[in-house]
Image (spheres, helix red, strand yellow):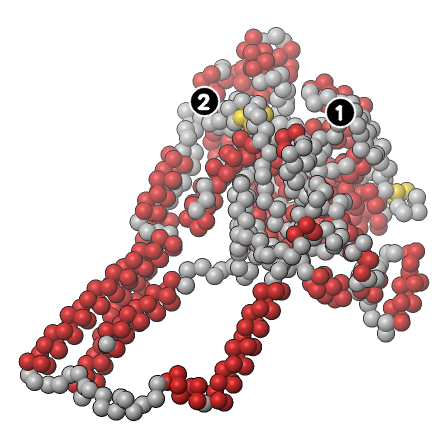
Amino acid sequence: MIKKKLHLSTLQLFLASLFLVFSMMGAQAQEDATTSDAESATPVEATPSESDTSGGNATQGEALFKANCASCHKLYKKAVGPALFEVTKRHDREWLYEWIKNSAALIATGDAEALAIYNEYNQSNMNAFPGLSNQDIDNILAYTDTPKPVATTAAPVDGEAAAGGGGTSSMTNNIVLGALALVLIVLIVVLFAVNTTLKRFATANGIQTEFEEEDRTERTPIWKAFVQNQFLVLVTAIFLLLASAYFVYGALMSVGVDQGYAPVQPIHYSHRIHAGVSQIDCKYCHSSARESKHSGIPSLNVCMNCHKSIAEVADGTYQEGIEEYGIDYNKEIQKLYSATGWSEDEQAFVGEEQPVRWVRIHNLPDLAYFNHAQHVTAGNIACQTCHGPVEEMEVMYQYSPLTMGWCINCHRETNVDLAGNGYYEEIHKELSEKRGGRQLTVADLGGIECGKCHY
Amino acid sequence: MNIYLKPFIYAACTLLLISCGDDGTKEVDAKSNRSFQYFPNMYESVGYEAYQEGAIFPGNMEAQKPVDGTVSRGWMPYEYEDDNDGYASAKANLINPVPLTEDHLSNGQALYGIYCAICHGAKGNGVGYLVETEKILGVPSYDAREITEGSIYHVMYHGINYMGSYASQTSIEERWEIVHFVEALRADLMGVPRKPVMDKDGKIVMPESGAAQQVTDSSETTNVAADSTMTTAAGNAPTDPQDQQTNDGQ
């Protein structure tokens, strides 16, 4: 009797403790949520001051700067042209008006100041902006005089604090797990203590706690009973055979199939950011997919088309990278710079080029022929049909099995767009009638003949 | 004995359950190793494949530049240098060898959509998606600059300022097709009629007639989203009045 009672109390204690732990976890998660909310709610914005000493409007200037100047100039960093912060202190305002409106004319007059800049920046012409009024230029200059906002330096510190305080989901999970393990250990110790104490009480009061099992010897052991029951043995054997066949079949079918293969690449390139967030067309980088067998790994000059001017990701993106993926995106861009030999200070390719050793993901065996142009350009198949939701992949992985069955299935199911194909119009019509008037698939046009892919 | 064992089992079970809870967002399980390959020679072939490493190549790379002086089929030398003089000379002298046909124009439009629209905008007004999201700044509208077919091609070939070269991504003919489309966009932005286009039968179609209008219409429908956002973005741009004109014109 007492033993049963004891047993129950163990379970009850355990359930109670479990409830306690979970409720603690919930409370902590809620706390996290509220703190992170509070953090994100605090404004981290530094708008350029409206009123300025020179009478220019910095907000209007910012728009003008972004539309006209930002293709060559940055505020605090040398770009194609010089950094423009406090340019008013370096040059006379009247001189700046003249320079911006038509720098070439100013250089032609032999102005020493103008010539010095022209020669310093490799004699590259600055566009003339005759359309900008003096007031416009004042506005731009007011904007270029705004000091570097404090928020940009404060933001990473803010992020660190958030990370330290357990603001990240993985951190919270780790802490919760740790706390849970600790609580469980404590619980077990407590249970033991309670149990021994109770037992001591029981023995002190003369209550029997350990029961001798009288009929122990008469019982047949469970394995002997099992062997004696032949039906059970048969069923188990069949079950085991089927189960092992299932696993062997699965293992054999996965030979040479690399679905889900996601190797770590030398540069962490996020397809999510480029194809997803930034909506850059796949073919922008993989341009040879349009016209050749290979889709091509873009050479780094294609990266530099944009990354000449994008040396750092936005603060929000940076935080996301650190917190969700544990990746410092800015460091990855620096890897690109060192591979191409790009120098940010000199804004030129001066260093040594280092080829990047990308790890190949999709690899068809040589016995099968596959042509990208045939599918992308002629077939008009979206890249995602085979490569999956690349625009959501932080780390690229092989989405499709790339097995023959998979190819054949698609060839059987995909209808061919035959419109505008004048030469074969009659044949296509006849073939369609032969197939019961339905639209023709790739298979109907010979898409599952062996020699199409194996030769 | 049972009494001591059970808490342990419970604890282990809970730990197991909880430790599984974190990830599982990916549909396909990512793995960092390839599976077993039967006859690996068919996967890692004896011959050199594209981008492969190979000790016999300089720099260990299979991907090599062509030997100096060799040209690929259909390649023509481009003789304008990447400097101010080259730009000026291309702007003045370079003429589009690709005839302005409907096919070339629509090809140009498709290519423009891939390579240019992301910064220059679907309408060429300098407000592409990357500009809208302030990732790339200072992209001028096509009507804000004095450009010719020669200078458009030159800039595509060599790049200018922060714009890189697109010579590696496009062929000679494709670049000229893009030039045709950029000129059409520029005409739209300036509010002047487009150049006459040749249709499939070799007939010259004036831009006011149905065929050319169709091209603009399709570009309109495909970029509905871009249009709606553009009107807000164009508020700051100095090219505002011209945008208005084009919209009215259409």
Residue A351: which quarter of the image? top right
Q: Nearer the viewer, residue A78 or A24?
A: A24
Q: Is residue A104 left or right of residue A232?
A: right
| Nearest-to-viewer mark from 1 and 2 | 1
Q: CA distance from mark 1 to mark 2?
A: 47 Å
Question: Which element carries disc 2, helix, strand or loop?
Answer: loop
Residue sitting nearer the eye, B250 or B93: B93
Q: Is B100 above or below relative to A13?
A: above
Tell me which amino acid carries mark 1.
Answer: Asp
Residues A400 and B76: in front is: A400
Q: Chain of mark 1?
A: B
Q: Residues within 10 Å of mark 1 (few under 14, many from 20)?
A: few
Q: Quadrant of residue A192?
A: bottom left
- Subunit that carries the residue with mark 2: A
Whole-percent x and y of residue B147? 73, 29
Is residue A414 positioned above or below A282 on the image?
Answer: below
Image side of residue A277 versus residue B197, left or right: left
Residue at mark 1: B68
As helix, strand or loop, the secondary structure at mark 1 comes to loop
Reading the image, the residue beneath label 2 is A86
